[in-house]
Image: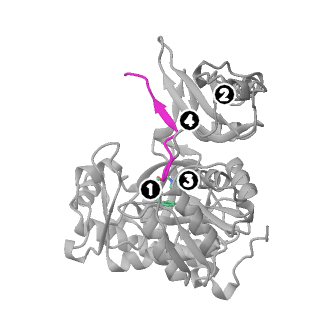
Amino acid sequence: MRLGDPPAPQDLDPIERASRDELMSIQLERLQRTLTHAYQHVPIYRQKFDQAGVHPSDCKELSDLAKFPFTTKQDLRDTYPFGMFAVPREQVARIHASSGTTGTPTVVGYTRHDLDVWADVMARSIRASGGRPGDIVHVAYGYGLFTGGLGAHYGAERLGCTVVPVSGGMTPRQVRLITDLRPDIVMVTPSYMLALLDEFERQGLDPRASSPRIGIFGAEPWTERMRAELEDRFDLHAVDIYGLSEVIGPGVANECVETKDGLHVWEDHFYPETVDPLTGEPAQAGELVFTSLTKQAMPVIRYRTGDLTRLLPGTARPAFRRMEKVTGRTDDMIVLRGVNVFPTQIEELVLRVAGLSPHFQLQLTRPGRLDVMTVRVEARPGALMDPQRSEDIHQSTPSSARPMNAARAEAGEALRRAVKDTVGVSVEVEVVDPETLERSVGKLKRVIDKRDN
Ligand code: DLL
């Protein structure tokens, strides 16, 4: 695998070469402007600021932002659909929306200038990932109300790439297009990249011989172990991209391929803080909170993302702080008999056990008074096979009636022990046949909650 080359300094945006002090002075000026814009044009911000007894003119330095109230998803729901907009609706050039699977959908809007900023930060993200003008970019993030597809699309065009706008789904066709068009870059959720991996193998193609040298993966949490898995099996650089629709979409933060040490937050547009998720007080590690610095249509002030991470000083782009890979969301956290468990913790452990594939689900049940979590994980194809297996097939024994073979039981036990030792909680493990768990096309649903509350 070719080492990820850093871009030549003259190819960076000027702000990427700025000093921290220069960046901070731009941030302060933009922050003051944003607070004023929100206060003047969005009734809910005016109300909340007034209630908290703060006024945009109270923001004299960046740390004064902590005096301002938070914005939550509930605020977006309460003002659905257009109540958070700070410009007349006719100046809104595009709408995106969340799927609304967990309640009222939330709508976000962009002026032409916002779309321009978005394309710029996405182009910057793709370049930081190792992309260059002229590269072919296969976009398998969903196109539509989800921000992944169109966000990646316009960013790749802005950088000067050739875009293949495939969107999600139709997996065999994705593999065909990757094989025939030979993209340099694939942009997709890590879980769907795994589904593409299966499809390569199903078609008898060697994924390591495929063309992509970079995968830009995001929209859901994924671990260092998953990075190693994807890099090894596809022979590419796997780089993390982060974003959320309320803030702009993908391109809020991105890893630099030469360091892969967390995501540089594009702080000239999005100001990050981390707070204690319970008290809301500033904390070194905790819930990520964003304030937009340049958005016109829908400025967000101290938006609570629900994502858990830690802010660190910049490395490959020294002026910009980094965020650690997101380990999970406050609402993804499973509290199992008093112990907090994140699906990413289980992912790390699953991928350490030989013979277990990265495809797993967490099923929650409540058979008695206590919650039980079952890790249902697929064996890797060809691994953990029962020597009697071929006879079983001839006898056409239904697979559910077959006893779990010794190798599977051992792998399951190894995982169970690892979870107990590392996370501190007892789980059940069920090792299932390859290709029996549902695959995601976009964002993966890891947890199946079968407890009736
Ligand atoms: O997922 C935007 C996006 C598209 C990001 C494509 C990256 C690539 P939403 O649908 O609004 O927007 O979901 C945002 O997804 O708050 C996180 O919980 C999660 N998320 C996004 N990127 C990452 C990541 C898009 N790299 C929510 N790691 C966020 C972990 C992520 N979680």
For the point 23% across and 68% down, the residue is 41
Which amino acid type is marked by label 4? Gln
In this picture, is 259 found above or below 70? Answer: below
- Kindly identify which numbered label has been placed on residue 192: 3
Q: Which of the 4 image quarters holds residue 303?
A: bottom left
Answer whether labels 4 and 1 touch (C-beta < 8 Å): no
Which amino acid type is marked by label 3? Tyr
Whole-number angstrom distance, CA of label 3 to CA of label 1: 38 Å
Which amino acid type is marked by label 1? Ala
Q: For the magenta stretch, what is the residue range?
A: 440-453
Mark 3 or 1, closer to the camera: 3
Which amino acid type is marked by label 2? Ile
For the point 75% across and 76% down, the residue is 5
Percent of width and height locating residue 174:
55, 62
Whole-number angstrom distance, CA of label 2 to CA of label 3: 30 Å
Whole-number angstrom distance, CA of label 4 to CA of label 1: 39 Å
In this picture, is 123 found above or below 42? Answer: below
Classed neighbour count for the residue bearing mark 2: other residues with Cα under 10 Å, few (<14), some (14–19), many (≥20): few
- Kindly identify which numbered label has been placed on residue 361: 4
Secondary structure of the residue carrying tag 3 is helix
Secondary structure of the residue carrying tag 4 is strand
Q: What residue is pinned by disc 2?
A: 393
Q: Is residue 164 left or right of residue 7?
A: left
